[in-house]
Image: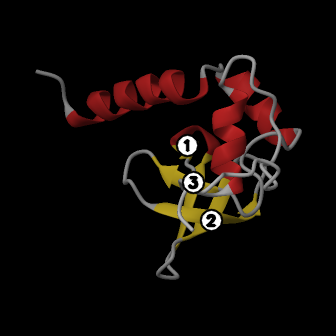
Amino acid sequence: MKNFSQFILESKKISKDIYFNLTADQLREEYITGNIFKEGSLLEKIDTGETGRVTRRGSNHLICVTENGNMFKAWITDVKEVYEVGTCSYRKHAQKYTPGQPVKPFTGKIKIKSSYK
């Protein structure tokens, strides 16, 4: 039987591979260049499940505030970005992974004909 600390270390390693598909060096490089975990992004802390918005970016950690006003700190390897369904950020995220779909806003150019009069 594994002890608790080994279990936590293994679960963090699995979570990093699933959520980022990046090595630790690649993750840090993406973070430093500002491609991920921008201020205002909604993040979930993997080990506790807390979600909050990024208020400050450190050299390799983030400070986030939950909707209740609670503050938590997390290493960049311990968080994943989450998206609220129905927002522009979620639309951009979904379009990015849809083959052949350009990432563009829907500005009401599509007119829906109503049969009700």
Q: Amino acid at mark 2?
A: Arg
- Position of 86 with respect to 37 (left or right) is left
Alpha carbon of mark 1 to alpha carbon of mark 2: how far? 12 Å
Q: Position of residue 31 (x, y in %)?
A: 78, 40
Looking at the picture, does residue 105 appear above or below residue 93? below
How far is the residue under mark 3 from the one under mark 1? 6 Å
Residue 4 point in image, percent of width and height: 22, 36
Out of 29 and 85, give the one closest to the viewer: 85
SS of the residue under disc 1: strand
Q: Which residue is mark 1?
A: 80
The local crowd at label 3, few if under 14, some if 14 to 19, many if 20 or more residues have their Cα within 10 Å, is many
Please report whichever mark, 1 or 2, sits nearer to the chain's N-terminal start: 2
Sequence-first tag of 3 and 1: 3
Residue at 77%, 53% in the rendered image? 38
Q: Residue at x 75, y 25 (%)?
A: 101
Do the residues under discs 3 and 1 have CB atoms within 8 angstroms?
yes
Q: Quadrant of residue 100?
A: top right
Residue tagged 3: 43
Disc 3 vs disc 2: Cβ atoms closer than 8 Å? Answer: yes
Q: Left or right: where does residue 16 sit relative to residue 105?
A: left
Mark 2: secondary structure: strand
User: Residue 25: image x %, image y %?
Assistant: 73, 23
